[in-house]
């Protein structure tokens, strides 16, 4: 029998912990109805046009997809206004994150920098790739410390990562600050801007560097169809990269990572402006509602440019989280982000939002 060894840091690996599902809470508490406001999913579900597209194309799934999703790449290129040679479609933007760590950073030599209380995927990929992961401190209100990221970078820094809008705070970096950071990073260091929630910023031209993409040669932007387009279950996202890097990743990746129906659905989603605009309307209305009502309940609330709001309740966050579960409402406690006093709640439908606020009020005032 062959023997094998596993690196000690992999044996100690702390995997990503997804949010609870509706089915889990129904079974645990014997509930008929559960409201899920924990995973930043689309409050309207999925576009009717996408549903019809999936129904129409379901019989094709015995065929392999075309490698690198060229039809979707073309559609994204037209939609975003970036050359198709700079676009890499992936099995969720997580696939692009993983590929960047494995292709750009050198195990045992490179470091990657982010700020604390951030998306655990970055740390997880660094550990799997054998790359040093550095975190810089935030301020008292968790602002994005872009200046500290620049100060922490050195000649061995492969990537600096900024999530904007940030998960879990909802804070966003302005285009001017992102441009300055890109300009001061060491040679050969990438600035990776994870824009999973960029659809929800206002005004959009103040936050995304994609509109001036041709001015940067070290910028990678990551986007997803999971949030505003309602395709979280199909796992499709993309990266906008410098063309040489995009070509390198295409040559090195395994084939067929984006399935046929995911490509069809994403193309259809880009064409459904009605669903997209209604999603933005519901999210922005709900975000304002949460901000106002949570403050009325005495909670500390952070300003958000995402489809969720982070708040600190007037009672311990973990006890509030459990009390909400017993009432059939799932939110996200933030201890796993290092923010144990806080809770993240994503915008739902108007009815779901009102039910959450009523139930939270009963818990906090009870």
Image (cartoon, rainbow, N blue to C red):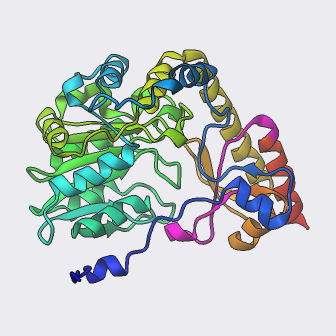
The quadrant in which the C terminus is found is bottom right
Q: Residue at 32% across / 76% down in the picture?
A: 10
Q: Nearer the viewer, residue 17 or 110?
A: 17
* In this rendering, position of residue 82 left or right of residue 79: left
Q: Residue pushed farthest front?
A: 1
Q: Nearer the viewer, residue 204 or 40?
A: 40
Q: x, y percentage for residue 140? A: 49, 66
Q: x, y percentage for residue 200? A: 53, 34
Q: Nearer the viewer, residue 149 or 349?
A: 349
Residue 282: tell me if it is visible.
yes
In this rendering, the answer to whether 47 lies above or below 351 is above
The quadrant in which the N terminus is found is bottom left
* In this rendering, position of residue 94 left or right of residue 219: right
The quadrant where residue 98 appears: bottom left
Residue 298: tell me if it is visible.
no
From which residue to which does the magenta span run? 330-351
């Amino acid at each position: 029998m062959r023997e094998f060894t596993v690196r000690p840091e992999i044996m100690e690996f702390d995997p990503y912990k997804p949010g609870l599902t509706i089915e889990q809470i129904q079974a645990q508490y014997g509930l008929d109805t559960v409201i899920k406001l924990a995973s930043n999913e689309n409050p309207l579900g999925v576009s009717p046009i996408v549903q019809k597209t999936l129904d129409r194309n379901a019989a094709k799934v015995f065929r392999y997809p075309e490698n690198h999703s060229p039809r979707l790449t073309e559609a994204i290129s037209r939609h975003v206004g970036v050359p198709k040679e700079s676009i890499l479609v992936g099995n969720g933007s997580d696939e692009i994150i993983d590929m960047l760590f494995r292709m750009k950073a050198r195990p045992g030599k490179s470091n990657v920098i982010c700020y604390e209380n951030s998306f655990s995927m970055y740390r997880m990929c660094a550990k799997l790739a054998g790359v040093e992961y550095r975190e810089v401190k935030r301020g008292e209100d968790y602002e994005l410390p872009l200046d500290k990221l620049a100060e922490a970078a050195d000649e061995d820094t492969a990537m600096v990562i900024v999530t904007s809008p940030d998960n879990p705070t909802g804070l966003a970096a302005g285009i001017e600050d992102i441009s300055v950071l890109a300009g001061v990073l060491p040679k050969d260091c990438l600035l990776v801007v994870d824009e999973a929630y960029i659809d929800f910023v206002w005004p959009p031209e103040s936050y995304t560097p994609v509109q001036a993409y041709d001015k940067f040669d070290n910028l990678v932007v990551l986007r997803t169809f999971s949030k505003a387009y309602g395709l979280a279950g199909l796992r499709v996202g993309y990266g906008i990269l410098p063309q040489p890097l995009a070509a390198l990743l295409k040559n090195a990746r395994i084939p067929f990572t984006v399935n046929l129906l995911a490509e069809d659905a994403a193309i259809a989603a880009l064409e459904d402006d009605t669903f997209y605009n209604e999603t933005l309307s519901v999210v922005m209305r709900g975000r304002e509602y949460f901000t106002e009502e949570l403050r009325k309940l005495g909670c500390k609330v952070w300003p958000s440019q995402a489809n969720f709001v982070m708040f600190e309740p007037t009672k311990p966050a973990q006890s509030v989280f459990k009390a909400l579960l017993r009432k059939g409402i799932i939110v996200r406690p933030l201890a796993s982000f290092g923010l144990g006093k806080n809770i993240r709640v994503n915008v739902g439908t108007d009815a779901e939002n009102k039910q959450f606020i009523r139930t939270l009020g009963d818990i906090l005032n009870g």
